[in-house]
Image (cartoon, helix red, strand yellow):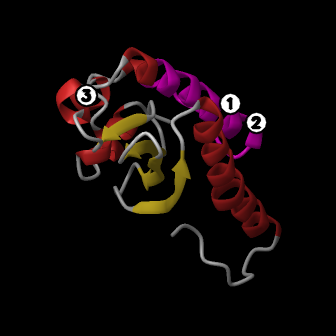
Amino acid sequence: MFDLELDDFSTGGPIAGESAAETARLQRMTTLVRDLLSRSGLFELVDVNASASPTVADHWLRKCNGCDADAARDLGADMSFVGFFRKISVMEQYLELRIRDARTGGLVHVSQTDLRGETDESWSRALKFLIRYELVEPELRRRDHPGSGQAHGQ
């Protein structure tokens, strides 16, 4: 699970760059996601700090057209997990989570939601919602009822 990223489309955002408050919020939310994924029992997380990939260090995985799978594979992971917030304005934001098979690079899961407000509460609520209802619970149902006809992923 790579660090969460910010894709800022707000007025002046791309010019100003990521603020210290945004960087700190992304770090807190990354910690939250790692905790949620670990506690789910579905994932064993790999330390991504060892990656030599510049796209990992620069937090640019959301725009590298699947290179996250290569970076994950290089780290010994089976899957890559990339999440990012797209900021349209302080009030209008979007969250997307992508999971790829590290071997093939194919997407195995994509989920997204809109959210309002640039606060820890709104960001954490959106993350908890997607992870629980779009990722963890569907996967647990699929494992408990194999062949139930539910599609996994998108």
Q: Are marks 1 and 2 in contact (CB under 8 Å)?
A: yes
In terms of depth relative to the viewer, which is nearer, 16 or 97? 16
Q: Secondary structure at mark 3?
A: loop
In the displayed structure, would residue 90 be above or below residue 32? Answer: below
Quadrant in which residue 146 is drawn: bottom right
Where is mark 1, residue-wise? 35
User: Magenta region's main secondary structure?
Assistant: helix
In terms of depth relative to the viewer, which is nearer, 69 or 57? 57
User: Where in the figure is residue 117, as x and y percent of width and height?
Assistant: 54, 41
Q: CA distance from mark 3 to mark 1?
A: 24 Å
User: Where in the figure is residue 104, as x and y percent of width and height?
Assistant: 35, 57
Where is mark 3, residue-wise? 53
Tag 3: residue type? Ser
10 Å neighbourhood of mark 3: few (<14), some, or many (≥20)? some
Q: Secondary structure at mark 2?
A: helix
3 or 1: tag closer to the N-terminus? 1
Q: CA distance from mark 1 to mark 2?
A: 6 Å
Question: Is residue 60 found left or right of 84 in the rendered image?
Answer: left
Tag 1: residue type? Asp
Extent of the magenta region? 24-48
Confirm whether the magenta stretch covers residue 7. no
3 or 2: tag closer to the N-terminus? 2
Where is mark 2, residue-wise? 39
- What's the residue at 38%, 52% (across, down)? 103
User: Where in the figure is residue 101, as x and y percent of width and height?
Assistant: 43, 54
Q: Name, please, the residue furthest toward the right.
A: 144
Question: Is residue 132 found left or right of 90 in the rendered image?
Answer: right
In terms of depth relative to the viewer, which is nearer, 121 or 134? 121
